[in-house]
Image (cartoon, rainbow, N blue to C red):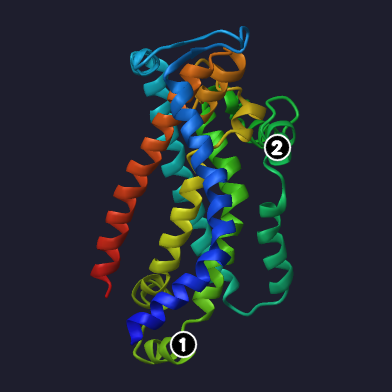
Amino acid sequence: MNGIRKTRRRFHAAPLLAPCVAFLFLWMIVPLAMTLWFSGEHYNLLIPGKSAFAGWENYRSLLANRALWVAMGNTLFLVGLVLLITLVGGTLFSVLLDHDFPGRNICRLLVIAPFFVMPTVSALIWKNMLMNPVFGLFAWITRSCGLGTIEFFSHVPLLSIALIVGWEWTPFAVLILLPALQSLSPELKEAARLDGAGPVALFYHIELPHLLRPMSVVAMMEMIFFLSLFAEIYVTTGGGPGLASTNLAYLIFRDALLGWDVGRASAGGVLAIVLANIVAFFFMRVVGRNLEDYR
Protein backbone atom coordinates (compact mmCIF):
# COMPACT_ATOMS: atom_id res chain seq x y z
CA MET A 1 0.00 0.00 0.00
CA ASN A 2 2.83 2.39 0.86
CA GLY A 3 4.49 1.59 -2.45
CA ILE A 4 1.32 2.53 -4.35
CA ARG A 5 1.07 5.83 -2.46
CA LYS A 6 4.69 6.68 -3.22
CA THR A 7 4.13 5.88 -6.90
CA ARG A 8 1.10 8.16 -6.99
CA ARG A 9 3.00 10.98 -5.33
CA ARG A 10 5.81 10.67 -7.85
CA PHE A 11 3.29 10.61 -10.69
CA HIS A 12 1.62 13.81 -9.45
CA ALA A 13 4.96 15.51 -8.78
CA ALA A 14 6.40 14.76 -12.23
CA PRO A 15 4.48 17.54 -14.08
CA LEU A 16 5.58 20.06 -11.45
CA LEU A 17 9.23 19.06 -11.71
CA ALA A 18 9.27 18.83 -15.50
CA PRO A 19 9.82 22.60 -16.16
CA CYS A 20 12.75 22.70 -13.73
CA VAL A 21 14.32 19.58 -15.22
CA ALA A 22 13.87 20.96 -18.74
CA PHE A 23 15.43 24.28 -17.72
CA LEU A 24 18.42 22.56 -16.14
CA PHE A 25 18.80 20.40 -19.24
CA LEU A 26 18.87 23.46 -21.50
CA TRP A 27 21.09 25.38 -19.09
CA MET A 28 23.76 22.70 -18.54
CA ILE A 29 23.55 19.77 -20.95
CA VAL A 30 23.10 21.73 -24.18
CA PRO A 31 26.20 23.98 -23.68
CA LEU A 32 28.23 20.94 -22.65
CA ALA A 33 27.11 19.04 -25.74
CA MET A 34 27.98 22.01 -27.96
CA THR A 35 31.41 22.26 -26.33
CA LEU A 36 32.05 18.58 -26.99
CA TRP A 37 30.90 19.01 -30.59
CA PHE A 38 33.10 22.04 -31.30
CA SER A 39 36.09 20.36 -29.63
CA GLY A 40 36.06 17.86 -32.47
CA GLU A 41 35.84 20.50 -35.20
CA HIS A 42 38.24 22.81 -37.03
CA TYR A 43 36.27 26.01 -36.44
CA ASN A 44 37.75 29.50 -36.68
CA LEU A 45 35.77 32.64 -35.92
CA LEU A 46 37.45 34.47 -38.80
CA ILE A 47 35.84 32.04 -41.25
CA PRO A 48 32.60 31.08 -39.42
CA GLY A 49 30.96 29.47 -42.44
CA LYS A 50 33.72 26.92 -42.89
CA SER A 51 34.37 24.03 -40.51
CA ALA A 52 35.75 20.52 -40.81
CA PHE A 53 35.83 17.45 -38.65
CA ALA A 54 39.03 17.31 -36.61
CA GLY A 55 38.51 14.27 -34.38
CA TRP A 56 41.11 14.20 -31.63
CA GLU A 57 43.44 16.65 -33.36
CA ASN A 58 42.48 19.62 -31.15
CA TYR A 59 43.18 17.56 -28.04
CA ARG A 60 46.49 16.29 -29.38
CA SER A 61 47.56 19.82 -30.32
CA LEU A 62 46.54 21.15 -26.94
CA LEU A 63 48.21 18.37 -24.95
CA ALA A 64 51.44 18.82 -26.93
CA ASN A 65 51.46 22.54 -26.12
CA ARG A 66 53.66 23.52 -23.16
CA ALA A 67 51.30 26.40 -22.37
CA LEU A 68 48.59 23.95 -21.30
CA TRP A 69 50.75 22.29 -18.66
CA VAL A 70 52.03 25.63 -17.38
CA ALA A 71 48.44 26.89 -17.17
CA MET A 72 47.29 23.76 -15.34
CA GLY A 73 50.13 24.11 -12.85
CA ASN A 74 49.33 27.78 -12.32
CA THR A 75 45.65 26.93 -11.87
CA LEU A 76 46.30 24.33 -9.17
CA PHE A 77 48.85 26.59 -7.44
CA LEU A 78 46.39 29.51 -7.38
CA VAL A 79 43.57 27.32 -6.08
CA GLY A 80 45.72 25.90 -3.28
CA LEU A 81 47.25 29.24 -2.28
CA VAL A 82 43.96 31.17 -2.27
CA LEU A 83 42.21 28.38 -0.34
CA LEU A 84 44.98 28.56 2.26
CA ILE A 85 44.67 32.36 2.53
CA THR A 86 40.88 32.37 2.78
CA LEU A 87 40.59 29.46 5.22
CA VAL A 88 43.34 30.70 7.55
CA GLY A 89 42.21 34.33 7.33
CA GLY A 90 38.53 33.42 7.65
CA THR A 91 39.19 31.24 10.69
CA LEU A 92 41.28 33.91 12.43
CA PHE A 93 38.74 36.66 11.74
CA SER A 94 35.91 34.40 12.90
CA VAL A 95 37.66 33.63 16.19
CA LEU A 96 38.37 37.33 16.68
CA LEU A 97 34.82 38.45 15.89
CA ASP A 98 33.38 35.76 18.13
CA HIS A 99 34.66 37.71 21.13
CA ASP A 100 32.92 40.75 22.53
CA PHE A 101 34.89 44.00 22.21
CA PRO A 102 34.07 47.67 21.50
CA GLY A 103 33.33 48.30 17.82
CA ARG A 104 32.76 44.63 16.98
CA ASN A 105 29.81 45.39 14.67
CA ILE A 106 31.87 47.93 12.72
CA CYS A 107 34.71 45.40 12.41
CA ARG A 108 32.27 42.79 11.09
CA LEU A 109 31.07 45.22 8.45
CA LEU A 110 34.62 46.09 7.40
CA VAL A 111 35.65 42.43 7.20
CA ILE A 112 32.66 41.43 5.08
CA ALA A 113 32.68 44.52 2.80
CA PRO A 114 35.31 43.26 0.25
CA PHE A 115 33.04 40.37 -0.72
CA PHE A 116 30.55 42.83 -2.25
CA VAL A 117 33.14 44.54 -4.46
CA MET A 118 33.19 43.41 -8.10
CA PRO A 119 36.31 41.42 -9.09
CA THR A 120 37.33 43.92 -11.78
CA VAL A 121 37.02 46.82 -9.32
CA SER A 122 39.04 44.90 -6.71
CA ALA A 123 41.75 44.15 -9.24
CA LEU A 124 41.93 47.80 -10.31
CA ILE A 125 42.15 48.98 -6.68
CA TRP A 126 45.01 46.61 -5.93
CA LYS A 127 46.77 47.28 -9.22
CA ASN A 128 46.63 51.09 -9.18
CA MET A 129 46.36 52.04 -5.51
CA LEU A 130 48.22 49.34 -3.58
CA MET A 131 50.66 47.45 -5.82
CA ASN A 132 51.60 50.17 -8.29
CA PRO A 133 55.43 50.34 -8.31
CA VAL A 134 55.47 54.16 -8.62
CA PHE A 135 52.71 55.60 -6.43
CA GLY A 136 51.18 52.50 -4.76
CA LEU A 137 50.87 52.19 -0.99
CA PHE A 138 53.05 49.07 -0.83
CA ALA A 139 55.77 50.77 -2.89
CA TRP A 140 55.78 53.71 -0.47
CA ILE A 141 56.09 51.31 2.49
CA THR A 142 58.96 49.34 0.95
CA ARG A 143 60.81 52.51 -0.03
CA SER A 144 60.33 53.91 3.47
CA CYS A 145 61.87 50.72 4.89
CA GLY A 146 64.83 50.96 2.51
CA LEU A 147 63.80 47.87 0.53
CA GLY A 148 63.39 49.63 -2.80
CA THR A 149 60.46 49.14 -5.16
CA ILE A 150 58.90 45.73 -5.74
CA GLU A 151 57.30 45.04 -9.12
CA PHE A 152 54.56 42.79 -7.75
CA PHE A 153 52.93 41.84 -11.04
CA SER A 154 56.28 41.22 -12.73
CA HIS A 155 58.25 39.52 -9.95
CA VAL A 156 55.52 37.61 -8.07
CA PRO A 157 52.43 37.65 -10.33
CA LEU A 158 50.75 34.52 -8.95
CA LEU A 159 51.24 35.64 -5.35
CA SER A 160 49.86 39.09 -6.21
CA ILE A 161 46.75 37.61 -7.82
CA ALA A 162 46.32 35.21 -4.89
CA LEU A 163 46.39 38.16 -2.46
CA ILE A 164 43.72 39.98 -4.46
CA VAL A 165 41.44 36.95 -4.69
CA GLY A 166 42.08 36.08 -1.04
CA TRP A 167 41.06 39.61 -0.04
CA GLU A 168 37.84 39.18 -2.03
CA TRP A 169 36.91 35.72 -0.71
CA THR A 170 38.03 35.75 2.92
CA PRO A 171 34.74 37.51 3.86
CA PHE A 172 32.85 34.57 2.35
CA ALA A 173 34.72 32.22 4.68
CA VAL A 174 33.87 34.52 7.61
CA LEU A 175 30.18 34.50 6.65
CA ILE A 176 30.16 30.69 6.90
CA LEU A 177 32.60 30.08 9.76
CA LEU A 178 31.48 32.81 12.19
CA PRO A 179 27.88 31.52 12.55
CA ALA A 180 29.26 27.99 12.88
CA LEU A 181 31.59 29.14 15.65
CA GLN A 182 28.79 31.00 17.40
CA SER A 183 26.70 27.81 17.39
CA LEU A 184 29.29 26.16 19.65
CA SER A 185 27.92 25.65 23.15
CA PRO A 186 29.22 28.32 25.59
CA GLU A 187 28.98 25.75 28.39
CA LEU A 188 31.46 23.52 26.54
CA LYS A 189 33.99 26.32 26.21
CA GLU A 190 33.48 27.37 29.83
CA ALA A 191 34.03 23.79 31.01
CA ALA A 192 37.27 23.65 29.00
CA ARG A 193 38.46 26.90 30.61
CA LEU A 194 37.66 25.55 34.07
CA ASP A 195 39.77 22.49 33.25
CA GLY A 196 42.71 24.80 32.58
CA ALA A 197 42.56 25.08 28.78
CA GLY A 198 44.16 28.26 27.47
CA PRO A 199 43.18 30.10 24.27
CA VAL A 200 45.43 27.93 22.06
CA ALA A 201 44.25 24.64 23.55
CA LEU A 202 40.63 25.83 23.42
CA PHE A 203 40.97 26.64 19.74
CA TYR A 204 42.83 23.46 18.78
CA HIS A 205 40.76 20.94 20.75
CA ILE A 206 37.30 22.57 20.80
CA GLU A 207 36.80 25.23 18.15
CA LEU A 208 38.85 23.81 15.27
CA PRO A 209 37.18 20.35 15.26
CA HIS A 210 33.82 22.11 15.37
CA LEU A 211 34.80 24.19 12.30
CA LEU A 212 36.05 21.32 10.13
CA ARG A 213 32.72 20.63 8.46
CA PRO A 214 31.93 24.28 7.57
CA MET A 215 35.56 24.72 6.45
CA SER A 216 35.13 21.80 4.04
CA VAL A 217 31.96 23.45 2.67
CA VAL A 218 33.81 26.76 2.23
CA ALA A 219 36.72 25.05 0.50
CA MET A 220 34.49 23.13 -1.89
CA MET A 221 32.41 26.17 -2.88
CA GLU A 222 35.45 28.40 -3.27
CA MET A 223 37.36 25.81 -5.27
CA ILE A 224 34.61 25.82 -7.91
CA PHE A 225 35.15 29.55 -8.44
CA PHE A 226 38.95 29.52 -8.10
CA LEU A 227 39.36 26.97 -10.89
CA SER A 228 37.86 29.55 -13.28
CA LEU A 229 39.57 32.75 -12.10
CA PHE A 230 39.70 35.21 -14.95
CA ALA A 231 38.82 38.84 -14.21
CA GLU A 232 41.70 39.44 -11.78
CA ILE A 233 44.24 37.99 -14.23
CA TYR A 234 42.82 39.86 -17.21
CA VAL A 235 42.85 43.23 -15.42
CA THR A 236 46.23 42.96 -13.69
CA THR A 237 48.74 40.84 -15.63
CA GLY A 238 47.04 39.68 -18.84
CA GLY A 239 48.45 36.23 -18.18
CA GLY A 240 52.03 37.49 -18.12
CA PRO A 241 54.84 38.03 -17.95
CA GLY A 242 54.98 35.27 -20.54
CA LEU A 243 52.91 32.43 -19.12
CA ALA A 244 53.75 33.18 -15.48
CA SER A 245 50.16 34.00 -14.47
CA THR A 246 48.20 32.22 -17.20
CA ASN A 247 45.69 29.78 -15.77
CA LEU A 248 43.45 27.37 -17.65
CA ALA A 249 40.53 29.80 -17.92
CA TYR A 250 42.74 32.55 -19.36
CA LEU A 251 44.36 30.09 -21.78
CA ILE A 252 40.92 29.12 -23.10
CA PHE A 253 40.02 32.80 -23.46
CA ARG A 254 43.26 33.45 -25.33
CA ASP A 255 42.64 30.60 -27.77
CA ALA A 256 38.97 31.48 -28.30
CA LEU A 257 38.85 35.29 -28.46
CA LEU A 258 42.46 36.23 -29.23
CA GLY A 259 43.36 33.28 -31.44
CA TRP A 260 39.81 32.83 -32.84
CA ASP A 261 40.22 29.04 -32.58
CA VAL A 262 36.89 27.81 -31.19
CA GLY A 263 37.74 24.13 -31.66
CA ARG A 264 40.94 24.28 -29.64
CA ALA A 265 39.32 26.48 -26.98
CA SER A 266 36.45 23.99 -26.67
CA ALA A 267 38.95 21.17 -26.22
CA GLY A 268 40.52 23.24 -23.44
CA GLY A 269 37.08 23.66 -21.88
CA VAL A 270 36.55 19.90 -21.85
CA LEU A 271 39.96 19.39 -20.22
CA ALA A 272 39.06 22.07 -17.64
CA ILE A 273 35.90 20.13 -16.76
CA VAL A 274 37.91 16.93 -16.39
CA LEU A 275 40.49 18.69 -14.20
CA ALA A 276 37.78 20.23 -12.00
CA ASN A 277 36.16 16.83 -11.43
CA ILE A 278 39.50 15.18 -10.63
CA VAL A 279 40.40 17.90 -8.12
CA ALA A 280 36.94 17.75 -6.55
CA PHE A 281 37.12 13.94 -6.26
CA PHE A 282 40.48 13.90 -4.47
CA PHE A 283 39.49 16.88 -2.33
CA MET A 284 36.34 15.15 -1.13
CA ARG A 285 38.33 12.00 -0.36
CA VAL A 286 40.82 13.96 1.76
CA VAL A 287 38.06 15.94 3.52
CA GLY A 288 36.09 12.77 4.18
CA ARG A 289 39.07 11.07 5.80
CA ASN A 290 39.79 14.10 8.00
CA LEU A 291 36.18 14.28 9.13
CA GLU A 292 36.23 10.58 10.00
CA ASP A 293 39.30 11.17 12.19
CA TYR A 294 37.44 13.79 14.25
CA ARG A 295 34.25 11.80 14.79
106 over 126 or under it: above or below: below
Q: Is residue 178 left or right of residue 54?
A: right
Residue type, mark 1 in image: Ser
Residue 288 image point, x, y percent: 29, 62
Q: Which residue is mark 1?
A: 185
Kindly identify which residue carries mark 2: 120
Residue type at numbered disc 2: Thr
Residue 250 occupies quadrant: top right
Taking depth in this image into account, of 119 and 36 the one nearest to the observer is 36
Place of residue 137 in the rendered image (x, y in percent of width and height, measured from the top left): 71, 37
| Secondary structure beneath label 1 | loop
Residue 125 lies in quadrant: top right
The residue depicted at 72 percent of the width and 34 percent of the height is: 124
Task: Please state the total of marks drawn on the protein image.
Answer: 2
Corner quadrant of residue 63: top left
Q: Nearer the viewer, mark 2 or mark 1?
A: 2
Residue at point 45%, 42% (across, down):
79
Q: Quadrant of the N terminus?
A: bottom left
Q: Nearer the viewer, residue 185 or 254?
A: 254
Q: Residues within 10 Å of mark 1 (few under 14, many from 20)?
A: few
Q: CA distance from mark 2 to mark 1?
A: 41 Å
Instruction: Determine the residue positioned at 50% across, 21% down.
Output: 265
Work out whether residue 182 or residue 64 is closer to the camera in this orientation and state it. Answer: 64
On the rendered structure, is 91 left or right of 23? left
* Residue located 48% across and 18% down the image: 263
Q: Regarding mark 2 in the picture, which secondary structure is present there?
A: helix
Mark 2 residue crowding within 10 angstroms, few (<14) / some (14–19) / many (20+)? some
**First in sequence: mark 2 or mark 1?**
2
Q: Is residue 185 left or right of residue 152?
A: left
Above/below status of 157 relative to 78: above
